[in-house]
Image (tube, helix red, strand yellow):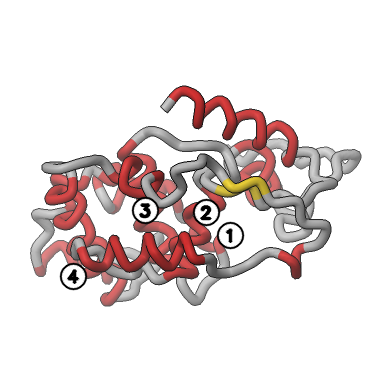
Amino acid sequence: MEPDHPRHDLARCAWPGIADPVYAHYHDTEWGVPLADETRLFEKLILEGFQAGLSWLTILKKREAFRAAFCGFDASRIARFEAADVARLMGDRSIVRHRGKIEAAITSAQAYLALREDTTLGALLWSHCPDGPVQNRHAQHDDIAAVTPESTAISRDLKARGFRFVGPTTVYALMQSTGMVNDHLINCHRHGPCAALQAAFHRST
């Protein structure tokens, strides 16, 4: 079921607009909110990789289909996918049918399981931001970076551990969506609430 049409009286970032309720709902309820659940972090990492070269709205509208196709993003199950599973996914019109990205998701699931023997995905990500979430105060979308030193360092770390489709731009999008950085515009109605949620999350970890 699609969310209700977004309120027109709220100032928000320009990128979601208000024409598509799915996009606006994601912006208003999820983007920039800290994420601790490991399965959902892994899901976001994989979906951000699938997004490369596409719009996030495309991925967002296919998210439930992705969850069904990829076993709820259970890494232990994805890591065991074989050629028949790749063929099945390549024939699934409800997801993004890109062989390289599908195979990368399987490889990344294997890397995720290996990582879990030493630490968690969340701990690895946050180790690159020891002072907590970055609070930006941008007035317009063009001021927002696509890559940062932190996203570059995380990308390098993830690649060294075997993850794929985790370039610096993809990682920065992950950081934005999971509350590692607050890139809501300063006049957006979500800037303040996300800043508070991020601060509370940092205090609790």
| Whole-percent x, y for residue 108 in the image | 23, 60
Amino acid on which disc 1 is placed: Leu
* Picture layout, residue 108 above or below residue 11: below
Q: Label 4: how many residues lie within 10 Å, few (<14), some (14-19) or many (20+)?
A: few
- The alpha-carbon separation of the residues under discs 3 and 2 comes to 9 Å
User: As rendered, which of 40 and 33 lies closer to the eye?
Assistant: 33
Which disc is residue 60 wearing?
Answer: 2
In the rendered image, which residue does mark 1 sit on?
Answer: 57
Spatial distance from mark 2 to mark 4, Cα to Cα?
23 Å
Disc with the residue nearer the chain's start (2 vs 4): 2
Q: Nearer the viewer, residue 142 or 102?
A: 142
Q: Which residue is mark 4?
A: 87
Gap in angstroms between the C-alphas marked 4 and 3: 15 Å
Which residue is depicted at the point 73% across and 41% down?
191
Residue tagged 3: 66
Give the residue type that dot 4 points to.
Answer: Ala
Mark 2, secondary structure of its residue: helix
Distance between the alpha carbons at the discs numbered 1 and 3: 13 Å
Give the label, 4 or 3, closer to the camera. 3
Distance (Cα) linking label 1 and label 2: 5 Å
Q: Please rate how many residues cluster around mark 3, counting C-alpha atoms within 10 Å: few if below 14, some from 14 to 19, many from 20.
A: many
